[in-house]
Image (spheres, rainbow, N blue to C red):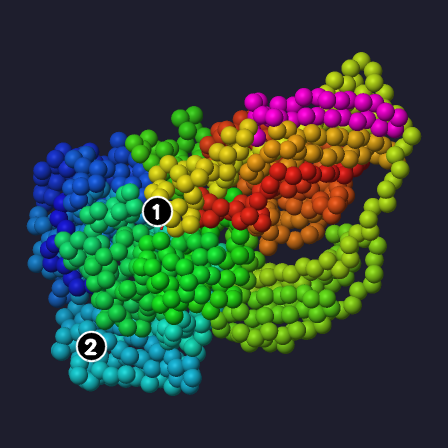
Amino acid sequence: MTSFSPGAGRRVAPRSRLASDAAELDLSGTWRFLFSGRPDLAPADGAAVDLDDSGWDEIKVPSHWVLQGREEWGRPIYTNINYPFPVEPPFVPDENPTGDYRIAFDVPEERGERVLLRFDGVESLAIVTLNGTQVGVVRGSRLAQELDVTDEIRPGRNVLHVRVHQWSAATYLEDQDQWWLPGIFREVTLLFRPADGIEDVWLRADYDPATGQGVLLPELRAGASGYPITVSVPELGVETTFASPSEVAAIPVGEVAPWSADRPRRYEATVRNAAETRSLQIGFRRIEVVGHQWRVNGRKLRLRGVNRHEYDPDNGRVFDAVAVREQLLLMKRANINAIRTSHYPPHPTFFDLTDELGFWVIDECDLETHGFQRDGGWTENPTDDPRWREALLDRIERTVERDKNHPSIVSWSLGNEAGTGQNAAAMAAWVHRRDPERPVHYEPDYDGFYTDIVSRMYPPVEQMEDMAAGTGTHPHAVAGRNAELAKRPMILCEYEHAMGNGAGALAEYERVFDTLPQWHGGFIWEWRDHGLRTTTPEGTEFFGYGGDFGEEIHDGSFVCDGLLLSDGTPTPMLAEFAAVTTPVKVTIDGGSVTVENRRHDGDTTDLRFVWRDELDGRQIGTGELTVPAVAPGESITVSLPGFEPHDGELWRTVEAVTASDAEWAAAGHVVTRAQTQLAKAAPALSVPADDVTPVARDGAISFGPATFDAFSGDLVSIAGAEVKGPRLELWRAPTENDSLSSFASYVDVEAVASRGMGSKTPSSAELWRAAGLDRLHRRVQAVEVEPGRLVVRHRYAPSAAQEAVVVELIWTLRAGRLHLDASATPSRGWKGTWPRIGLHLELPAGLAEARWFGTGPDENYVDSHAAAHVGRFEAGVDELSVNYAVPQESGHRAGLRELHLPEIGLGITATPVAGELPGFSLRAHDAAEVTSAAHPHELPDSSATHLYLDVQQHGLGSRSCGPDVRPEYQLRPRAAAWSLTFDVR
Ligand code: IPT
C-alpha cells in the first residue's frame, strides 16, 4: 500500500492493444465481493481457494463499488486539487476502503504456452492472487497491466482473488479533478498466448505529403522461432514476409490516401506467423514540428478541441463503447476535431473510435499531483522526487506502448498539474527516444525545457499575444523565456471554462488562433458535467456534485463544468463553439459571399450552400448557390442574387449544409451559418397617443385594456390576464463565472491570480451583493393621471446607500394598444458593474409556450452570441432556460422585436430606443428564487412566469477558472430606455 514501486510480481512489459486470433477469456460479469472499511478488517483468508464465499455480496465487474447504491460500501468523493486525506506520502489513511473480489472460472486443457492476466483499470491498488498464490500487485488506475500467470493457472476450475484498496501510495499520482471512484472499473481478461506468438507490433505508417507515397515501418516483437512473419495490407497489395528479425525493414506501399481527422482513411492490416494473426487498422500520416508549426501531412494543425474525461452519470468511469460513439458523433456535429484525454489514458477502445471517426488526440498519461501545490510551492512533489522515478517512467511507458499504433494520437502528454521536475524530464526523454515522431506535451513545463509544445491554461488573450511576440513572461517561467518559446508551436490545453452559463469571449480566442502563427488552437474545459445521478431522501432524482455525498471536504459544483449537462443535454455553449470554430467559414459581404475552407483535408464538395431572405422574420426567397470546390486553405467568393427593396427588416442567411447523409449527421446538417441585414426596419412612425385619459376609481386605475394599482402604479392586469410590474431589476442569479463561489474556496488563489486567471479581488457576485443590488428597495415617487397618459415614477435603492435609480414609466394608449415608454436613470456615485438593467414583469404562473421574433434559438449574451441569429422562434418556457447543475442566470436572448404568449393572448412589441432593443428571458422562477437554489430540485413551486426585458446584461466571462468578463462586455452603471407596446389578441 505504501510502496513507491509501479507494481510487483511477474509484470509483462507493456505492449500494444491489438486484436489477435489467440484465445482470450473475458472475466467481466458477476463476481463475489466483500467490502471492508479498513484493510485490517478484510478477511484474512479472502484469497484461499477453498473459501466458501457464498455469503459474500455480488458485484458486477467492471464497476465502481461506490456506485452500486450500497451506502455501506462508501460513497463517491469529489475533490479538485485536494487529496481527501492528509498529505504524507507514501502513507494513506487507516480508513482505507477495501474490496475483496473473487471469481471462479474454468480454463480449457489447451491453454497455450503462456497465460497472461490483464487488468485494464483498477482504482487504485490491486493485490492479485490466483489459486492461492499471489501473482502480482497492480498500480496505475487507468493503465493496463498484464501479469504472467502461466505457473498458477490450471485446467478446469480456477479461483481468482483481487483485493482492491481505494487508497495507496499510487493515489498521490492520481489527483485529477474528478470523483474518487474505487473498484475494478475496466475489464479483466485472460490471454492464452500461443508458443511463438507475436507479442507486439508497431506498424508506423508514414505518409510523404510531397509525393503521396506511404511507407510501413514495422517493429515486431516475437521470438526468433516466431519467424517468418508476414505483414499484409490487402487493399494496397502489400504482402511482405520477413524470414528473421534481422530482415524486418521498411515496406514502401506506393500511393496511399492519408489519414486525417477530416478524412480518417484507414487500411486493414494483419501481421501473422504460423502461430498467431494480429490485426489492426492503420492510418498513414506524418507528424512533424517544423519551427513553430506543428504539422500533420505537411499542413499546420488546427485544434478545435475539448478535454474529455471518462464519465457516465450512473457508471462513473466504466466505458460504454456505444454511448461513447454517440458522444463522438455529437462532437463531430459541433465541429470539434480534437480531444485531450484529460487526464489519463481512456479505455483502449476509445482510440479505435477516434481513428475511425477522425479526431486529433492528445493521449495523456495517468499522472496528476496537484495537491502538492500548496502555498504556490510543490513541496515533496513526486514529479521531482527520485523515489517516484520508476513509477512515473512506468506510467508513460504503459501509456505510449498500449496506444502507439493509433493514427489519431498526434501527441503524448506526460500528465496534468503535477508540477515540474526531474521525473517529468525523464518521462519526456523516454518518449523522445521511443517515439521521435509525436511531440511531447506537458503544460507545467512552462519553460519548454523538455517538451515540444508550448502549452498554457486559461490565459487572457493578451498573454497569448505576448507569447507569440516573444515578449512578456509567464509567472512561473524563467524571465525572458518567451522569446525562445515563440519559436515553437503553442496550444491551450485548457481554456474557456464551460462551467454553468458561459464561458464568454470564445471568439476572442479564435481570433488569436486565426492570426498568430504559433497558436494551433486549444481544448475547451471540458466536454461534459460529471454529476452523479442520485436522489434526495424524499426520492427526487437529481445529479449530485461535491457535497451531495456527505464528503468531509469537497469542491462543490466544480465537477460540473462541461459543454454538456450531466444527462448529456448540450448547453448553448456547444452551439457557440460550433459557430465560432467552424472549419468552413462563410462571410457575406454586400452582394457576395466568401467561402473559406479551413479544414485540414478535403474540399467543400460535401456541402451545399443555401441562402434565404427573411422579411420581418418571414421567408420571402430562397435558393442554392453554386460554389466551386474550395480546397483546404483556400477561399472563393461568389455573388449572391440581388434583392428588392422592402418595407421592413430584411435579413439574408447563408448556410453551409451537408449534402448527403453521414453517420455523424443527416443530410442538411448546418455546418456553419452567416447572416447579414440587408435592410433595417423603417423607424416606427410615432403613433400619436389616443385622447383617452386613465380613470382612477376604488384604488385602481383603468386605462384601455389595462388596470393599475392606484398607489404603486403597477400593472395589475391586461385584458383580464394578471400582470404585475414592471419593476426595475439590476440583479441576476449569479452564474458560476460571476460568483466563483466554489472556486475561491480552495484554489491556490495566489498561483491562479499570478497566472492572470481569476483574481484575488472579490467576485462580481460578491461586489454586486456588497452594493446591495440583490436587495433594492422601491419607493413610489409619483403616480399621476394626466390627460392621455399615466405617469409613474419609482426610485430604487439599497438600504444604507445614497445611490439610486429612478424609473419613469409613461403609459399611453396608441390606436387602442397599451404603450409604455420607460426609462431608468442612475444617480451619481454608482461604482463597479451591474449584472443587468431590466424590467421585470410577473405573468400568470404556468405559461408553457412562447413565440418570438428576435435572436435565438438559444440564450445569448454580449460575449457569446456567434450561434444566435435573427429570426422567428418558438419554444416551451421550460426550454428557454438551461437546467445548469447549479441554478443561475440563463435564457437571455438579445434583440427582442416581438414576443407572443399564446396562452394569455398577450403580445409585446419592442421598438428600438437610440438603436437599442431589449433582450428577454422568460422563466418559471425569478432571479431571487434562482439565486437561492443550489440544485434544480431546490427551486420552489412556481408562483408566476417571470419576464425580464433587459436593455443590457453583463457578459459571461470565464472567471470560474480563467479571465473575467472583458471590459468591453461589462455592464457599467448606465441609463436605459424601453419602448414597448402590449397587444391583446
Ligand atoms: C485545471 C485542471 O487541469 C483541470 O483538471 C480542471 O480542474 C480545471 O482546472 C478546472 O475545472 S487546473 C486550474 C486550477 C488551473
Q: Nearer the viewer, residue 589 or 79?
A: 589
Quadrant placement of the N terminus? top left
Q: Nearer the viewer, mark 2 or mark 1?
A: 1
Q: Residue furthest top?
A: 698
Q: Nearer the viewer, residue 96 or 896?
A: 896
Answer whether residue 793 is visible to the viewer in this image: yes
Q: Residue at x 59, y 55 (%)?
A: 866
Question: Residue 636 at x, y = what percent?
Answer: 63, 74
Which image quadrant for residue 549? top left
Tell me which segment is drawn in magenta.
773-802
Q: Amino acid at mark 1?
A: Ala
Left or right, residue 647 beside residue 67 = right
Query: Marks 2/1: CA distance?
Result: 59 Å
Question: Residue 856 at x, y = what percent?
Answer: 64, 49
Disc number placed over residue 625 in the picture, else none: none
Which element is circle 1 on?
A: helix
Which image quadrant for residue 447? bottom left
Which image quadrant for residue 911? top right
* Comes first in the chain, label 2 or label 1: 2
Quadrant placement of the C terminus? top right
Residue under label 2, please give it: 274
Left or right, residue 87 beside residue 758 = left
Instruction: Judge: label 1 CB < 8 Å from ligand 1.
Output: yes
Q: Is residue 661 above or below residue 924?
A: below
Disc 1 crowd, CA 10 A, few/some/many (<14, 14-19, 20+)? many
The secondary structure making up most of the magenta span is strand
Which element is circle 2 on?
A: loop
Q: Residue at x 71, y 44 (%)?
A: 917
Q: Amino acid at mark 2?
A: Ala
Question: Residue 299 at x, y = what percent?
Answer: 45, 75
Disc number placed over residue 751 in the picture, else none: 1
Q: How many marks?
A: 2
